[in-house]
Image (spheres, rainbow, N blue to C red):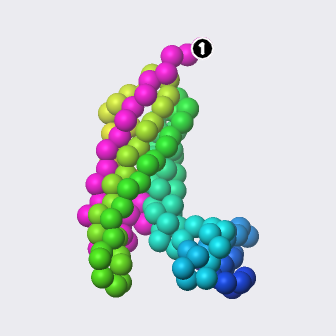
Protein backbone atom coordinates (compact mmCIF):
# COMPACT_ATOMS: atom_id res chain seq x y z
CA UNK A 1 0.00 0.00 0.00
CA UNK A 2 1.37 3.39 -0.99
CA UNK A 3 0.19 6.98 -0.80
CA UNK A 4 1.70 10.11 -2.29
CA UNK A 5 1.02 13.55 -0.82
CA UNK A 6 1.70 16.51 -3.16
CA UNK A 7 1.67 20.15 -2.13
CA UNK A 8 -0.66 22.28 -4.26
CA UNK A 9 -0.50 25.78 -2.72
CA UNK A 10 -0.88 27.52 0.62
CA UNK A 11 -1.75 24.65 2.97
CA UNK A 12 -3.52 22.54 0.32
CA UNK A 13 -2.34 19.04 -0.60
CA UNK A 14 -3.54 16.24 -2.84
CA UNK A 15 -3.21 12.72 -1.47
CA UNK A 16 -3.08 10.01 -4.15
CA UNK A 17 -3.45 6.36 -3.21
CA UNK A 18 -1.94 3.33 -4.90
CA UNK A 19 -5.49 2.32 -5.87
CA UNK A 20 -5.67 5.39 -8.10
CA UNK A 21 -7.87 7.68 -6.02
CA UNK A 22 -7.19 11.20 -4.80
CA UNK A 23 -8.49 13.51 -2.08
CA UNK A 24 -7.73 17.12 -1.23
CA UNK A 25 -6.50 18.07 2.23
CA UNK A 26 -6.29 21.69 3.34
CA UNK A 27 -5.67 23.74 6.44
CA UNK A 28 -7.52 26.61 8.00
CA UNK A 29 -7.03 30.19 6.82
CA UNK A 30 -4.95 30.92 9.92
CA UNK A 31 -2.18 28.62 8.62
CA UNK A 32 -2.44 29.66 4.98
CA UNK A 33 -5.21 27.33 3.86
CA UNK A 34 -8.35 28.11 1.92
CA UNK A 35 -10.57 25.41 3.41
CA UNK A 36 -10.58 23.43 0.14
CA UNK A 37 -10.59 20.00 1.78
CA UNK A 38 -10.70 18.01 4.97
CA UNK A 39 -8.09 18.48 7.66
CA UNK A 40 -5.79 15.48 8.20
CA UNK A 41 -7.36 14.58 11.57
CA UNK A 42 -10.81 14.71 9.96
CA UNK A 43 -9.49 12.25 7.39
CA UNK A 44 -8.46 9.92 10.22
CA UNK A 45 -12.04 9.96 11.55
CA UNK A 46 -13.39 9.42 8.03
CA UNK A 47 -11.05 6.45 7.70
CA UNK A 48 -12.34 5.04 10.97
CA UNK A 49 -15.95 5.48 9.87
CA UNK A 50 -15.29 4.02 6.44
CA UNK A 51 -13.47 1.00 7.85
CA UNK A 52 -16.27 0.27 10.34
CA UNK A 53 -18.97 0.89 7.74
CA UNK A 54 -17.44 -1.62 5.34
CA UNK A 55 -17.15 -4.21 8.11
CA UNK A 56 -20.78 -3.78 9.16
CA UNK A 57 -22.03 -3.83 5.57
CA UNK A 58 -20.08 -7.00 4.81
CA UNK A 59 -21.28 -8.83 7.94
CA UNK A 60 -24.93 -7.83 7.49
CA UNK A 61 -24.91 -8.87 3.85
CA UNK A 62 -23.25 -12.16 4.76
CA UNK A 63 -26.00 -12.83 7.30
CA UNK A 64 -28.60 -12.01 4.62
CA UNK A 65 -29.97 -8.89 6.28
CA UNK A 66 -31.95 -6.54 4.01
CA UNK A 67 -29.84 -3.45 4.70
CA UNK A 68 -31.09 -0.25 3.04
CA UNK A 69 -28.92 2.41 4.67
CA UNK A 70 -26.09 2.81 7.15
CA UNK A 71 -24.83 6.09 8.56
CA UNK A 72 -22.09 6.48 11.14
CA UNK A 73 -21.93 9.71 13.11
CA UNK A 74 -18.59 10.18 14.85
CA UNK A 75 -17.73 12.57 17.67
CA UNK A 76 -14.19 12.91 18.93
CA UNK A 77 -12.18 14.76 21.55
CA UNK A 78 -8.50 15.62 21.25
CA UNK A 79 -5.76 16.19 23.77
CA UNK A 80 -5.19 19.82 24.81
CA UNK A 81 -1.42 19.68 24.28
CA UNK A 82 0.72 18.71 21.32
CA UNK A 83 0.54 16.10 19.92
CA UNK A 84 -3.22 16.64 19.91
CA UNK A 85 -4.12 12.97 19.54
CA UNK A 86 -7.68 11.73 19.84
CA UNK A 87 -8.50 10.86 23.44
CA UNK A 88 -12.18 9.93 23.06
CA UNK A 89 -14.10 8.78 20.00
CA UNK A 90 -17.75 7.77 19.87
CA UNK A 91 -19.33 6.07 16.86
CA UNK A 92 -23.10 6.10 16.51
CA UNK A 93 -24.33 3.68 13.84
CA UNK A 94 -27.76 4.30 12.30
CA UNK A 95 -28.71 1.12 10.48
CA UNK A 96 -31.87 0.91 8.37
CA UNK A 97 -33.39 -2.06 6.61
CA UNK A 98 -36.29 -4.41 6.21
CA UNK A 99 -36.90 -6.85 9.06
CA UNK A 100 -33.38 -6.46 10.39
CA UNK A 101 -32.54 -8.71 13.32
CA UNK A 102 -31.25 -6.58 16.18
CA UNK A 103 -28.92 -9.37 17.30
CA UNK A 104 -27.21 -9.34 13.87
CA UNK A 105 -26.81 -5.57 13.86
CA UNK A 106 -25.47 -5.56 17.43
CA UNK A 107 -23.02 -8.34 16.57
CA UNK A 108 -21.80 -6.64 13.37
CA UNK A 109 -21.25 -3.30 15.10
CA UNK A 110 -19.43 -4.78 18.08
CA UNK A 111 -17.26 -7.11 15.98
CA UNK A 112 -16.20 -4.23 13.78
CA UNK A 113 -15.40 -1.93 16.69
CA UNK A 114 -13.69 -4.52 18.88
CA UNK A 115 -12.00 -6.87 16.43
CA UNK A 116 -12.07 -6.28 12.67
CA UNK A 117 -11.64 -2.54 12.00
CA UNK A 118 -7.90 -1.98 11.64
CA UNK A 119 -8.26 1.78 12.07
CA UNK A 120 -10.14 1.30 15.34
CA UNK A 121 -7.46 -1.05 16.60
CA UNK A 122 -4.76 1.56 15.88
CA UNK A 123 -6.68 4.47 17.39
CA UNK A 124 -7.60 2.62 20.58
CA UNK A 125 -3.93 2.92 21.61
CA UNK A 126 -4.52 6.60 22.47
CA UNK A 127 -8.31 7.02 22.49
CA UNK A 128 -11.16 5.56 24.46
CA UNK A 129 -13.47 4.33 21.70
CA UNK A 130 -17.16 3.77 22.37
CA UNK A 131 -20.03 2.95 20.09
CA UNK A 132 -23.75 2.43 19.99
CA UNK A 133 -26.33 1.82 17.32
CA UNK A 134 -29.82 2.79 16.31
CA UNK A 135 -31.89 0.29 14.38
CA UNK A 136 -34.60 1.49 11.99
CA UNK A 137 -36.78 -1.26 10.61
CA UNK A 138 -38.54 -0.21 7.42
CA UNK A 139 -41.64 -1.74 5.96
CA UNK A 140 -41.52 -3.27 2.51
CA UNK A 141 -43.22 -1.09 -0.09
Question: Is 76 positioned to the left or the right of 140 in the image?
Answer: left
Residue at point 52%, 74% (across, down): 40
- Place of residue 135 in the rendered image (x, y in percent of width and height, measured from the top left): 39, 32
Q: Is residue 45 above or below residue 69?
A: below
State yes or no: residue 132 in magenta: yes
- Place of residue 10 in the rendered image (x, y in percent of width and height, measured from the top left): 67, 84
In front here: 120 or 76? 76
Residue 26 appearing in the image: yes
Residue at point 49%, 66% (across, down): 42
Q: Is residue 103 above or below residue 24?
A: above
Residue at point 52%, 33% (across, down): 67
Q: Quadrant of residue 122?
A: bottom left
The span picked out in magenta is 113-141
State yes or no: residue 52 in magenta: no
The C terminus: image quadrant: top right
Q: Is residue 12 above or below residue 105?
A: below
The N terminus: image quadrant: bottom right
- Place of residue 39 in the rendered image (x, y in percent of width and height, measured from the top left): 54, 71
- Place of residue 105 in the rendered image (x, y in percent of width and height, measured from the top left): 38, 37
Q: Residue furthest left?
A: 128
Q: Quadrant of residue 15?
A: bottom right
Residue 62 appearing in the image: no
Residue at point 49%, 50% (across, down): 53
Which element carries disc 1, helix, strand or loop? loop
Q: Residues within 10 Å of mark 1 (few under 14, many from 20)?
A: few
Q: Residue furthest top?
A: 141
Identify the residue under disc 1. Answer: 141
In front here: 30 or 93? 30
In front here: 80 or 117? 80
In front here: 120 or 85? 85
Amino acid sequence: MNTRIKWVEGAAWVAESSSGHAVVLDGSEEIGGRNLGMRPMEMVLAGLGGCSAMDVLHMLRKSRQALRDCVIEIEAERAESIPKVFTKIHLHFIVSGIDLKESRVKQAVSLSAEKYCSVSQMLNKTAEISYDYELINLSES
